[in-house]
Amino acid sequence: MISDRICDRAKQYWLLARFDRPIGTLILLWPTLWALWLAGNGKPDALVCTVFVLGVVLMRAAGCVINDYADRNFDPHVERTRQRPIAAGRVRPKEALILFAVLCLISFGLVLLMNPFTIGLSFIGAFLAASYPFMKRFTHLPQAYLGAAFGWAVPMAFAAQLNAIPLVGWLLYLTVLLWALVYDTMYAMVDKDDDLKIGVKSTAILFGDYDRHIMAALQIVILGLLAIVGSMRGLGLFYYAGLLVAAGLAVYQQKLIFRRERMLCFKAFLNNNWFGLAVFIGLVLDYRFV
């Protein structure tokens, strides 16, 4: 039946784009919303917000598709990824490339609603997103490159709201880059044994026995940068209360990864969703009530 074929293709594409696992979208969405609220002084433009939220959903999906295409020869050898649609043979690589192109084109159509500065920045973002999956072949710092790609929504958000990127925007971008480096290292710790066998590089491998210590230091830097951002924007009690909650979550994540157990490392990665939400709630409340 043609209808059954169409439904099966739609299901496989849905799984390939990870729409069934929204955690990646949320972790990408929170810093985008931080930037929109900061750039808009608590009242971001409705059209800009809509475009960026939809853009986050679509570009995260596109990133997952191109990642699985790039890793199609690695994923069958990794316990956590061997059942992904391309690795399991349910989606052909050519189909994945077509889906990636469609998602990018829709995203670009949304960006065209923004000012020329933002449109120009989108080309850099597209390059970072498309090239990230291949970095693990050449460098032990693909997690930092992921941060550069995921964080690019921050300067774009400031550009869309202000038609400029002030210093606070670049500081927030650095913050998000370091945050992605931390949570994606936690994610990489899950696959560390498999990655060592197949020759994939990651910060989890690079940091070695100092992984927890380096991430703890980075988490302190991240919270410090967020505090500086708050000071530069004149934020108050609610915002810093949000940072305090985020600090508590960072401590909890350190507890989870202490023994480097796979499932607990993955749980620590997932917990970063709440870290991002805590900061965002603090921002919203501060602009609403202060």
Image: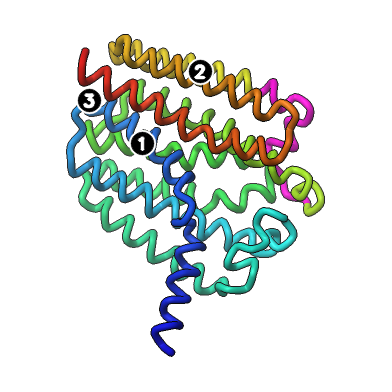
Q: Residue at x 31, y 56 (%)?
A: 108
- The amino acid marked with disc number 2 is Ala
- Measured in 3D between alpha carbons, the distance from the residue under mark 3 to the one under mark 2, in whole angstroms, is 23 Å
Query: Compared with residue 4, is residue 272 higher up or lower down, i.e. above or below?
Result: above
Q: Secondary structure at mark 1?
A: helix
> Of helix, strand and loop, which one carries label 2?
helix
202 vs 223, nearest the viewer: 223
Residue, x 20% and y 50% (percent of image)?
113
* Location of residue 242 (image quadrant): top left
Disc 1 marks a residue whose amino acid type is Thr
Mark 3 neighbour class, 10 Å CA radius: few under 14, some 14 to 19, many 20 or more: some
Question: Please, what is the three-letter code of the amino acid marked with disc 3?
Answer: Gly
Residue position for label 3: 42
Write down the quadrant of residue 198 in the picture: bottom right
Could you classify mark 1 by the number of other residues whose Cα lies within 10 Å: few (under 14), some (14-19), or many (20 or more)? many
Residue 74 is situated, as x and y percent measured from the top left of the image, at 70, 59
Name the image quarter holding the N terminus. bottom left
Callout count: 3
Depth order, front residue of 216/8: 8
Q: State whether residue 134 appears in this view.
A: yes
- In magenta, the rendered stretch is 199-214
Residue 32, numbered circle: 1
Q: Is residue 6 magenta?
A: no
Q: Does 207 lie within the magenta span?
A: yes
Placement of 117 over or under 242, stated as above or below: below
Say which residue label 2 marks: 247
